[in-house]
Image (cartoon, rainbow, N blue to C red):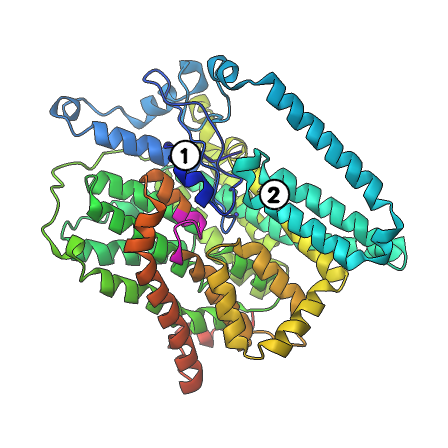
Amino acid sequence: MASLSIGVRLPPSHHHLKKRSLPFLSQTQSLSPSQPCFGSSLRGIRGSRLPGSGILARAEDKARGSNSSSSSAQQQQVQPSSEKEFQDLSPSSGSCDPLCSLDETSSHDFEANYRPKTDLLKAIAVLAAAATGAVAINHSWVAANQDVAMALLFGIGYVGIIFEESLAFNKSGVGLLMAVSLWVVRSIGAPSTDIAVSELQHASAEVSEIVFFLLGAMTIVEIVDSHQGFKLVTDNITTRKPRTLLWVVGIVTFCLSSVLDNLTSTIVMVSLLRKLVPSSEFRKILGAVVVIAANAGGAWTPIGDVTTTMLWIHGQISTLETMKTLFIPSAVSLAVPLALMSLTSEVSGKAPDTSNVMASEQMAPRGKLVFSVGIGALVFVPVFKALTGLPPYMGILLGLGVLWVLTDAIHYGESERQKLKVPQALSRIDTQGALFFLGILLSVSSLEAAGILRELANYLDAHIPNVELIASSIGVVSAIIDNVPLVAATMGMYDLTSFPKDSEFWQLIAYCAGTGGSMLVIGSAAGVAFMGMEKVDFFWYLRKVSGFAFAGYAAGIAAYLAVQNLHISLPTTVAQVPFLSGS
């Protein structure tokens, strides 16, 4: 869905463009030659899909290494063996491993940024706000006007999340405060406290399934990446022809994102591009293709995006039907931008000079085995659900347990490989991102329990009776506002009695929420990661890419409607497998 850090800083002029702050990006100290840790003040990716926190740090570190390796002197250096690399990166070496904590700031930075008067004013403001809230929440007006009070709290909390960078409040903390405050108001306005407690217990059970699933998936991805497992994918991209490379990068990212999350896929592919193509306008175009492909690839599988996972876990969509129905629209939403971009001057021109800029990196011992087991564990989750009927988070915990035992066995007795094991991976995953999801989903569930979302659904039904238009609008809005609360609110507004499982509405919500974020660079986790890694300007993406992304988004919706009206389905022999039907 530890904190992630990007090794570049956005110019101050871009900070106001971020619609939200991502929990897995945090401020870190600047890079120095003697200190390989690096970071950024950029904290603005939405929580669409979450990777482990060490992935982006290592991606940036590798990219820096690849750029510096282009000199002939460094090319003549002998590559260290895998064993020596792991020894050099161990904590005992005294250097800052890219996997180490990236949130520590030096005393110099602390002294430079420390402002006693400003900090005192902030503390007084927080205490005053807390005191005011405590007094107001016991007021009889809250009990009599529960809906208005909850709507105001949610609005204030969401503003705090969107403007986290300006307010200097982490959005995970704001989300948790918002969730608790909303449920306190609900307990005051409910017919009885017992009813509110029962509603909270029901909501917590549903939300915890998603959080457990995300934690397990994030850990598996982090373990695979720490073993350099994704080299098996990226090393097979050898073409240098611009137009061919454009399509190859898009298709590989599309396939990768259907199993992984969009942020991890973007980090892996942009890191490859930084080694494959020198800094140029063409490389930025390729990076934009990665963003579009990553978002499109996650929309057609139940494990490819947090929003599709939420819909899948709660029973709005099923595995096979989603894959059959949404594959064609998702593929169209990628193919249209690729076709249009192929006609641009940046792609149709001469191939850039790529003279030996690829960096050779050592894969960890048994990296291929870990990659196979890790990807197999993710793919097996829908099968596990179909076979046992148990919730998906049990399947992901099964895969994590298998991978845990496997890594303990293959690295037994090797003290220098401790960071390749699960305990170290757990310290690097985005736990604060998971807490953000917990806060957001609990907040939305409180609005659902109070009946506010149902009233909103009735209003939309009365004024916008077209379900296709409602779903399409949600996709457009997701380019500006976080798609997770949008989908969570939609699930609260419409239940399975309004729209049954695998209905056109839920399928469109899965597609639109997943791909709509590509229309703006700040519209998805993939976009903001690309924005930070390649120093891409918001308005550059708006001029060069947004039109193509919107064309793909609209074409995908048209393709979905055409498929439904013509009753076209993706031919597959999987449909004959009994245990996958209805999973």
- Please identify the quarter of the rendering in which residue 32 is found: top left
Residue type, label 2: Gly
- Residue sitting farthest toward the bottom: 566
* Picture quarter with the C terminus: bottom right
CB-based contact (under 8 Å), mark 1 and mark 2:
no
Instruction: Find residue 160 and name its label.
Output: 2
Q: Is residue 358 left or right of residue 410?
A: left
In whole angstroms, how far apart are the C-alphas of marks 1 and 2?
19 Å
Residue type, label 1: Pro
Task: Judge whether residue 438 can be spotted in this image.
Answer: no
Pick the front one: 566 or 484: 484
Instruction: Find residue 12 and name its label.
Output: 1
Residue 38, image x and y in percent? 40, 26
Pick the front one: 425 or 503: 503
Q: Secondary structure at mark 1?
A: helix
Query: Few, some or many C-alpha atoms within 10 Å of disc 1 (few <14, some 14-19, many ≥20)?
Result: few
Q: Secondary structure at mark 2?
A: helix
Q: Residue at x 19, y 61 (%)?
A: 342
Q: Residue at x 42, y 61 (%)?
A: 515
Q: Is residue 142 left or right of residue 167?
A: right
Chain-order first, disc 1 or disc 2: 1
- Please identify the quarter of the rendering in which residue 401 is found: top right
Q: Give the answer, above or below, for where 256 lies relative to 219.
A: below
> Is 523 covered by the magenta stretch?
yes
Task: Judge whether residue 71 can be spotted in this image.
Answer: yes
Residue 481, image x and y in percent? 52, 54
Tell me which segment is drawn in magenta: 519-527
